[in-house]
Amino acid sequence: MRGLALLLLLGALKGCLLQNMQVSQIPAVSSTVGSTVTLQCHYTLSSTENVIIGWYKWYRHVPGGPEVSNDNGDYTGRVSRASQSELFNNRSANIQLHRVQSSDTGMYICEVTFVFSQTLQGHGNGTFLNVTGDVTAYPSVTVHRYFHVHHLVGAIILGTLISFAVYLSCRTQESKMSRRETRTVRLHRRTIHGTNWTIRANGQWSHDSAY
């Protein structure tokens, strides 16, 4: 009788030990827009020998809140999960959130569940994810705009200079032609003994009665 009672007591104590699970999370983590962040979750359990099945979930804001998974439209294609092997062997229930958005800022709760003779469930105190702007993106946008404006201003200045140069060239040509015509007139007109003479295109001189 005493031996049977002792076995029953040991079995009860073992069951109590199995039910003592604690889930731990990092209080806060920071990330930038567009990057990948790891939300860590670990648990302590005396033994997983009698566990039939186990799983874990992540919730937004509070336990049982919006689930953080690829089945949720807000996170579709952005969540990577620790494998079942990592869950049992490494006692890790981490997830990675890819292409982080500003709207991802908030509290994330990890919940771990095991089933053996009964269901054992526990959750952490939460990890607050703080998402900041991508500090490397804004300078690149600024630089791009700067070069765009710089090229535009440069093109305007270059066009103005070219137009001014053409204008000066035309004015210079007109001035030269005017001086050349004046010089031609002066060279083709002659006064001989008080009489004005003009040379024709054929090279002959004729008396200019108007002068």
Image (spheres, grey):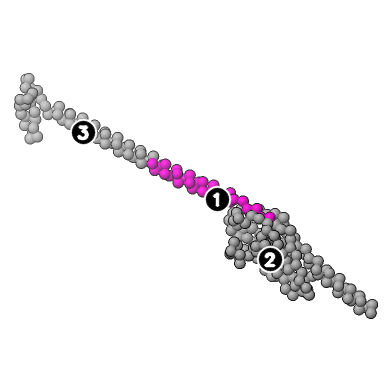
Q: How crowded is mark 2: few (under 14 residues within 10 Å), some or many (20 or more)?
A: some
- Measure how far apart labels 3 and 1 are at the Cα level: 60 Å
Is 7 drawn above or below residue 170 in the view shown?
below
Q: Which residue is drawn at 63% across and 53% down?
A: 131
Q: Does the magenta stretch include residue 146?
A: yes
Q: In this view, does 103 lie to the left or right of 112?
A: left
151 lies above or below 126 = above
Q: Mark 2 points at which residue?
A: 57
Provide the secondary structure element on which disc 1 rests.
helix
- Residue matched to label 1: 137
Q: Residues within 10 Å of mark 3 (few under 14, many from 20)?
A: few
Q: Which of 97 and 59 is in front in this view?
A: 59
The residue labelled by disc 3 is: 177
Identity of the residue drawn at 43% across and 44% down: 151
Kind of residue sitting beneath label 3: Met
Q: Can residue 149 be seen in this view?
A: yes
First reached walking from the N terminus: tag 2 or tag 1: 2
Q: Which of marks 2 and 3 is nearer the N terminus?
A: 2
Mark found first going from the N terminus, 3 or 1: 1
- Within the image, what quadrant is residue 72 found in? bottom right
Q: Nearer the viewer, residue 66 or 185?
A: 66
- Kind of element beneath mark 3: helix
User: Which label sits on residue 172?
Assistant: none
Dividing the picture into quadrants, the one containing residue 54 is bottom right
Give amino acid for label 2.
Answer: Lys
Name the residue at 49% across, 48% down.
Answer: 144
Q: How crowded is mark 1: few (under 14 residues within 10 Å), some or many (20 or more)?
A: few
Q: Give the Cα distance between marks 2 and 3.
A: 91 Å
